[in-house]
């Protein structure tokens, strides 16, 4: 039985690493979560100890390749906090960042509450609660030295490798966008690299958004007005280093970019 004391011990350890930007080989065996439910319990407890407000949610491992890379069976949900959200065009500090990648993502902002319920929400029901869409870049990181082998319970506890998040401009005319097949042009240091496509995000980022809502609903958690959900990278993460710049052009949805230092 995973006790409240063990949950708190794991949450305290992870929050300290978040604050100090440090990492470990793994949580102590005495408090290491062993299931998705236990991982989410630690994530919740760490959130309750946070000094910063909840900004929204992220989804990790929304592609088969991503799931294989970190040895998980499906997507993972994590929390985003206001202190880690940066403006469009920001300078992003890569100091002590283990992963050193930029992920090009669709971000949906809610207009109204989607409370927990017994039945799953449909994609249409979820989209009916969306206010707008933003182009975005996630700069993930892990509190584990070998996140590939940490396992889904520990990864969930650690907010599914959440770290920094760059939010692009608000797009209100978002409903008719081709989320599956519209190419998202990506530039690294002003040079075009492989484009992203929404079909790489569980087949459609709107499907991924509904997955997140239903994952939280099953945990008894609401999605609230103003919260942003970033749905996972729409292309292989872009490897970056200090001095690099990344820009993604989402067409009618706008552009988002940042520079790494």
Image: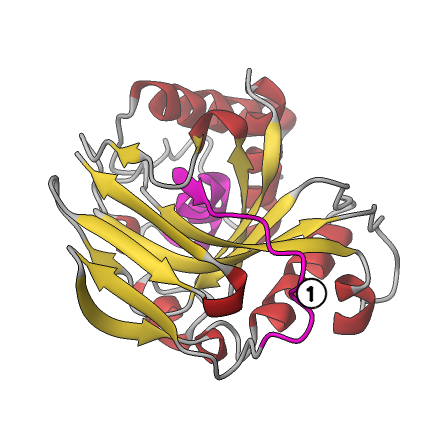
- Report whether residue 233 is seen: yes
The single residue placed furthest to the top in the displayed view is 51
Q: Looking at the image, which is closer to me, 57 or 254?
A: 254
Q: Is residue 4 left or right of residue 76?
A: right
Residue extent of the magenta highlight: 151-177
Q: Residue at x 44, y 39 (%)?
A: 158
Q: Is disc 1 surrounded by few (<14), some (14 to 19) or many (20+) residues within 10 Å?
A: many
Picture coordinates of residue 152, whole percent (x, y): 45, 54
* Residue 183 rendering spot, x and y as whole percentages: 40, 78
Could one spot residue 33 in this view of the protein? Answer: no
Q: Nearer the viewer, residue 62 or 167?
A: 167
Image quadrant containing the C terminus: top left
* Count of labels in the image: 1
The residue that appears at 56% across and 69% down in the rendered structure is: 205
Instruction: Identify the image quadrant of the N terminus.
Output: top right
Q: Quadrant of residue 56?
A: top right
Percent coordinates x, y for residue 57 in the rendering: 58, 46
Q: On the rendered structure, is 234 left or right of 3?
A: left
Q: Is residue 211 above or below residue 38?
A: below
Residue at horizontal 29 percent and vertical 40 percent from the top? 144
Task: Please check the rendered image and state whether residue 172 is part of the magenta-colored stretch, yes or no.
Answer: yes
Residue 129, by quadrant, is bottom right
Residue occupying image coordinates x 29% and y 68%: 236
User: Tag 1, which secondary structure?
Assistant: helix
Q: Which residue is mark 1?
A: 210
- Left or right position of 175 against 85: right
Q: Is residue 180 above or below residue 102?
A: below
Q: Residue furthest bottom?
A: 181
Does 101 appear in magenta?
no
């Amino acid at each position: 039985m995973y006790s409240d004391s063990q949950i708190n011990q794991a949450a305290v350890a992870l929050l300290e690493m978040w604050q100090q930007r440090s990492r470990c080989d793994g949580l102590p065996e005495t408090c290491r979560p062993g299931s998705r439910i236990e991982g989410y319990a630690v994530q919740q407890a760490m959130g309750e100890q946070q000094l910063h407000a909840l900004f929204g949610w992220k989804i990790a491992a929304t592609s088969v390749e991503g799931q294989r890379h970190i040895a998980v069976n499906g997507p993972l949900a994590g929390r985003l906090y206001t202190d880690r959200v940066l403006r469009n065009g920001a300078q992003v500090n890569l100091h002590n960042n283990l992963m050193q990648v930029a992920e090009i993502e669709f971000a949906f902002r809610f207009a109204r509450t989607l409370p927990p319920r017994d039945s799953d929400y449909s994609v249409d029901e979820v989209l009916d609660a969306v206010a707008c869409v933003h182009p975005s870049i996630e700069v993930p990181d892990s509190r584990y030295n070998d996140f590939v082998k940490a396992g889904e319970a520990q990864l969930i506890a650690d907010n599914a490798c959440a770290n920094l998040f760059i939010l692009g401009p608000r797009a209100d005319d978002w409903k008719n966008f081709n989320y599956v097949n519209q190419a998202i042009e990506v530039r690294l240091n002003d040079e075009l690299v492989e484009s992203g496509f929404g079909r790489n995000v569980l087949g459609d980022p709107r499907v991924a958004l509904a997955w997140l809502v239903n994952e939280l609903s099953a945990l008894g958690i609401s999605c609230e007005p103003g919260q942003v959900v970033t749905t996972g990278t729409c292309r292989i993460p872009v490897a970056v280093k200090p001095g690099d710049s990344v820009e993604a052009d989402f067409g009618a949805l706008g552009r988002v970019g940042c520079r790494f230092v």
